[in-house]
Amino acid sequence: MSVLTFDVDGLLTDAIRKEGVEDFGGPGFREPLGVLCAAYEAAPLSEVGRWILRAGLVHSLRMRLRVHEWVAIATPRSARSGSRTRSWSSG
C-alpha cells in the first residue's frame, strides 16, 4: 500500500497549508473531487504516478483558493454579503 493517498480532506488540508487561506467557495466541487480521487486510488499507479497526480490535484486546489481570495479582495464587502460561498469545512 502506498504512503501517498488521494484522501479528499488530506488534499484540501495540504492546499490550505500551502496557500494560507481556506475559502474554497461553495462545496459543490467536493463530490466530483471524491469520485476522481477514488478512481486514482483504484488505478494501478506507480509511486511516481501517484505523486504526480496528487501534486496536480493539490496545485488545482491551490489555484481555486487563490481565485476565491482574489475575488474577495476585488469585490467590495457589501457586494459579498449576499454571497453563498462557504469554507470547505462548512457542511
Image: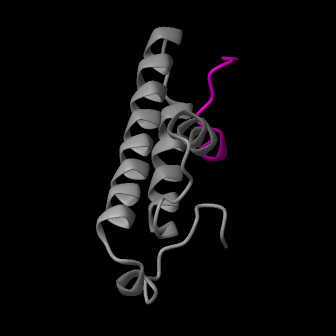
Tell me what residue is drawn at x 63 percent, y 42 percent: 13
Which quadrant would the C terminus be assigned to in this image?
bottom right
Q: Nearer the viewer, residue 66 or 78?
A: 78
Q: Nearer the viewer, residue 18 or 53?
A: 18
Q: Is residue 21 magenta?
A: no
Q: Position of residue 75 (x, y in %)?
A: 31, 72
Which quadrant would the N terminus be assigned to in this image?
top right
Q: Nearer the viewer, residue 1 or 73?
A: 73
Q: Position of residue 26 (x, y in %)?
A: 47, 70
Tell me what residue is drawn at x 47 percent, y 51 percent: 33
Prevailing secondary structure of the magenta residues? loop
Place residue 88 in its image quadrant: bottom right
Residue extent of the magenta highlight = 1-10
Residue 82 vs 4, above or below: the answer is below
- The residue furthest left is 74
Q: Position of residue 27 (x, y in %)?
A: 52, 67
